[in-house]
Image (spheres, rainbow, N blue to C red):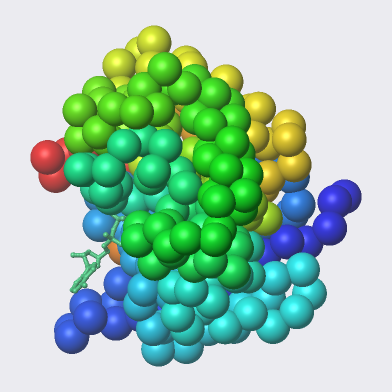
């Protein structure tokens, strides 16, 4: 079995009277595509926000490759090698596609994000190297032809892929994707599936929140299922799919709509 990449234990997060996460934990091994699923409001995004430093948990312990990891600030999370995308796309809409990826790349360099936006003189060589890598990443996710288009003019599916390219620019150990297939048509989902398999094949571990159960079950090595903030199942997709608690949670959620 491959090495443990991320280990999370005992995460609790309360919003006022709502226990959004209750003793949640999971273990992701290096090279896995790991799915985090569950009905609406189960706590999936809250969990992402905790592990990426956006929310402070009430309790919980975190280890990355066996070392204590404190997701206390967004920049620290990036330095630790975790990159993420968001359920609601967060791109710099007025900037071009390639500039969006370059911002991600600058997170990994001493120039910093400010350097990416307000270019100063004397850094031309570094800037060129960053631009070249950004172009490679746009090509990798299949949208190189839109490099000089403003991000906001790209189709929804292409914006999602641009977000992935920007996240990859930080050279993460773990890529956390919050509903990457949301709003995509069947063809776009197939392309996305191929892309995620390539990313995984190239050595980046993936943690995926996704509502498309078929996509998750076909793609993921292991899955954790949340319901009302609690882990109700964990295992390989075929096992989890047959778990009565999981069937019940999804049927209950469908009946409520
Ligand atoms: N900042 C917040 N303040 C108050 N309540 C919140 C906050 N963020 C999330 N919640 C609540 O926590 C619960 C879990 O929400 P979360 O967004 O994590 O669920 P989810 O599983 O990602 O749902 P979905 O699939 O609909 O995106 C929900 O009841 C939500 O309303």
Q: Is residue 94 left or right of residue 63?
A: left
Q: Tell me residue 94's x, y (percent).
A: 20, 43
Total label count? Answer: 0
Give the image quarter of residue 25.
bottom right
Residue at (54%, 61%) from the top-left corner? 122
Q: Tell me residue 205's x, y (percent).
A: 66, 47
Query: In the picture shown, does residue 99 fall above or below 43?
Result: above
Q: Nearer the viewer, residue 254 or 199?
A: 199
Which quadrant holds the C terminus? top left
Residue at (62%, 44%) from the top-left corner? 129
Of all residues shown, which one is farthest toward the top?
187
Q: Is residue 222 left or right of residue 243?
A: right
Of all residues shown, which one is farthest toward the front?
122
Of all residues shown, which one is farthest toward the left?
257
Q: Tell me residue 227's x, y (percent).
A: 36, 57
Ligand 1 sits in which quadrant?
Answer: bottom left
Q: Is residue 88 left or right of residue 167?
A: left
Give the image quarter of residue 154.
top left
Q: Tell me residue 107's x, y (percent).
A: 52, 62
Q: Nearer the viewer, residue 107 or 78?
A: 107
**Residue 204 in view in this figure:** yes
Residue at (55%, 51%) from the top-left corner? 124
Residue at (25%, 23%) from the top-left corner? 155
Query: In the picture shown, does residue 43 fall above or below 34?
Result: below
Of all residues shown, which one is farthest toward the bottom?
58
Query: In the picture shown, does residue 93 fall above or below 110?
Result: above
**Residue 253 in view in this figure:** no
């Amino acid at each position: 079995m491959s090495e443990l990449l991320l280990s999370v234990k005992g995460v609790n997060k309360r919003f006022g009277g709502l226990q959004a996460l209750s003793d949640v934990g999971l273990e992701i091994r290096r090279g896995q595509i790991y799915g985090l699923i569950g009905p609406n409001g189960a706590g999936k995004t809250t969990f992402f926000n905790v592990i990426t430093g956006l929310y402070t948990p009430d309790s919980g312990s975190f280890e990355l490759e066996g070392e204590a990891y404190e997701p206390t600030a967004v920049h620290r999370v990036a330095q630790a090698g975790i990159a993420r995308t968001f359920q609601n796309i967060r791109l710099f809409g007025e900037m071009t596609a390639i500039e969006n990826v370059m911002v991600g790349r600058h997170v990994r360099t001493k120039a910093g994000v400010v350097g990416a936006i307000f270019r100063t003189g004397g850094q031309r060589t570094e800037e060129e190297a960053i631009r070249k890598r950004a172009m490679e990443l746009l090509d990798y996710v299949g949208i190189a032809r839109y490099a000089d288009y403003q991000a906001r003019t790209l189709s929804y599916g292409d914006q999602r892929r641009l977000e992935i390219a920007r996240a990859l620019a930080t050279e993460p150990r773990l890529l956390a994707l919050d509903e990457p297939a949301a709003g995509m048509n069947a063809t776009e989902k197939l392309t996305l599936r191929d892309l995620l398999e390539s990313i995984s094949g190239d050595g980046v571990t993936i943690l995926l929140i996704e509502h498309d159960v078929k996509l998750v079950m076909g793609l993921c090595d292991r899955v954790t299922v949340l319901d009302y903030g609690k882990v109700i199942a964990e295992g390989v997709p075929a096992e989890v799919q047959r778990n009565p608690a999981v069937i019940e949670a999804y049927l209950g959620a469908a009946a409520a709509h």
